[in-house]
Image (tube, helix red, strand yellow):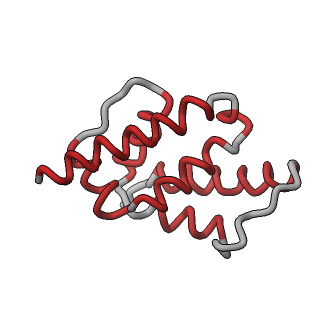
Amino acid sequence: MAKFNIFIMVTLILASGVMASLAQKKIRQPKHVPGYPLHLLHCARRVEDECGKEIFLGMFERLPVSKKCCLQLIKKMGKTCHDDLDKAIVHLPKYSSRASTAIPKGNRIWHKCALVARRT
């Protein structure tokens, strides 16, 4: 039986929501990233769904990111994808009011994970 990948589903929903939100606000998708929703999907697929969930929840809750997920974030996803997904999430109406705390938390997650990756 195929494994249901919740993180990819969340990313698809986020990507479609971001595009709708951007259209409503008349903000254009970045010209340097053609196919932005597809880009977000490819980014999300670089980590296991369990890790995507840990990273996502870490932005909004006081939850730690495991060593396994830190390594996937740093070595598989990369900084650009991490930042793009963070920005996409906070552009959604449900999360936009928390952007001022979520983006810095996302940056802290990245830096903590970078330290973990250097030690291994």
Residue at horizontal 27 percent and vertical 50 percent from the top:
114
The answer to whether residue 75 is left or right of residue 90 is left
Residue at horizontal 17 percent and vertical 53 percent from the top:
118
Residue 50 in view, yes or no: no
Q: Position of residue 37 (x, y in %)?
A: 64, 64
Give the total number of marks visible in the rendering: 0
Please tell me which residue lies in front, 62 or 44.
62
Q: Residue furthest left?
A: 120
The answer to whether residue 23 is left or right of residue 88 is right
Q: Residue furthest top?
A: 62
Residue 98 in view, yes or no: yes
Image position of 77 with respect to 22: above or below: below
Q: Position of residue 71 (x, y in %)?
A: 24, 54
Please tell me which residue lies in front, 39 or 30.
30
Residue at horizontal 29 percent and vertical 56 percent from the top:
72
The answer to whether residue 56 is left or right of residue 71 is right
Image position of 50 with respect to 19: above or below: above
Q: Position of residue 22 (x, y in %)?
A: 79, 53
Q: Position of residue 43 (x, y in %)?
A: 48, 63
Residue at horizontal 56 percent and vertical 49 percent from the top:
10
The answer to whether residue 24 is left or right of residue 57 is right
Quadrant for the N terminus in the image: bottom left
Q: Quadrant of residue 26?
A: bottom right
Image position of 85 with respect to 42: above or below: above
